[in-house]
Image: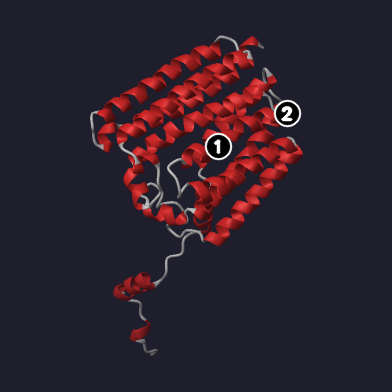
Amino acid sequence: MTSIDVSDQVTPERRLARTDLEPTVAPTGSRIADVVSTYVGLTKPRIIELLLVTTVPAMFLAARGIPPIGLVVATMVGGCLAAASANVFNCVLDRDIDEQMRRTRRRPLPRHAVDARAATIFGAVLGVAATLVLGFFVNWLSAGLALGANAFYIFVYTLWLKRRTSQNIIWGGIAGCFPPLIGWTAVTGHLAWPPFILFAIVFFWTPPHTWALAFRYREDYAAAQVPMLPVVRSAPVVARQIMVYSVATVAVSLALWPVAHTGLLYPVVAGVTGVALLWEAGRLLARANRGLTDAALKPMRLFHWSNSYLALVFVAAAVDPLLRF
């Protein structure tokens, strides 16, 4: 008779113990998806969407109709890669700030989902790819403008202005004004006054848009020692500045009508949406003058509407020549 070694038997208790001790291994597909998600997060996709909104309409305006689809695709791909590269470098350089802010502490670098060296290499690869795509499939003027925008964003805004002055977003925001120039030169191969008007729209629009968001996260910026205007100035002062820049945004947007010789659709859309933008800025100013708390100021109303405003104005600039075409 064969003896049975009790030690070899797997009792329910032992089965449970082994299960508890065995490491859980995530499926390969899940790990790959996590890595992809992490690197995509470094590129800040929402910001890239906004940049494309100001690039493609400039191409339609430059073409006075529908530009070649292949050219649009190449410009979009190159532009996405360029913006992604700049955003990755921004994440690397600002990772100490991002760790201290509620809005950004879940980004890949603050939660240590990727190390700074790998992120830096990723950003450099994206930048090289962007330059090559734009240079070979669009033109080298557009590629140079994209490269210049990235350099401005990284070295002027991120490394120099952001931590040193409350004027950071005014001048640092110039980097975000380049997409209309890139879109126009992609079609024409040269610069002209209409894309500079589009450039100026984004330039004057950026401070009200960003300061509205900074109102919402003022304590975060203060904790990270980033001197955004709402951190270093009172709410009424900031709200007045927002109104000034909002007025300038609307005025410059209407200047595109005679400069680019648009039809009536564009000035009507720019005028109506501009009134709505000024209305929201005025309401914010009124609430600030009443001495309300940051939450009661409701700055995100202006922030969200400013996004819609910019999109509608640029879409109108793209659709207007199609109607005449």
The residue carrying pointer 1 sits among few (fewer than 14), some (14 to 19) or many (20 or more) residues within 10 Å by Cα, namely many
Amino acid of disc 1: Ile
Amino acid of disc 2: His
Q: Position of residue 167 (x, y in %)?
A: 46, 40
Q: Quadrant of the C terminus?
A: top right
Which mark identifies residue 187? none
In the image, residue 199 above or below residue 78 = above
In-image side of 33 versus 22 (left or right): right
Q: Position of residue 8 (x, y in %)?
A: 38, 83
In the picture of the structure, the residue carrying the numbered disc 1 is: 174
Name the foreground residue: 324 vs 39: 324
In the image, residue 56 above or below residue 217 = above
Q: CA distance from mark 1 to mark 2?
A: 20 Å
| Secondary structure of residue under mark 1 | helix
Name the foreground residue: 97 vs 85: 97
The residue carrying pointer 2 sits among few (fewer than 14), some (14 to 19) or many (20 or more) residues within 10 Å by Cα, namely few
- The residue most toward the right is 136
User: For residue 180, which quarter of the picture?
Assistant: top right
Q: Position of residue 115 (x, y in %)?
A: 51, 61
**Residue appearing at x 50%, y 17% in the figure:** 270
In the picture of the structure, the residue carrying the numbered disc 2 is: 190
Name the foreground residue: 296 vs 323: 296
**Residue appearing at x 54%, y 55% in the figure:** 32
**Residue appearing at x 55%, y 22% in the figure:** 315
Q: Quadrant of the N terminus?
A: bottom left
In-image side of 175 versus 291 (left or right): right
In-image side of 118 versus 59 (left or right): left
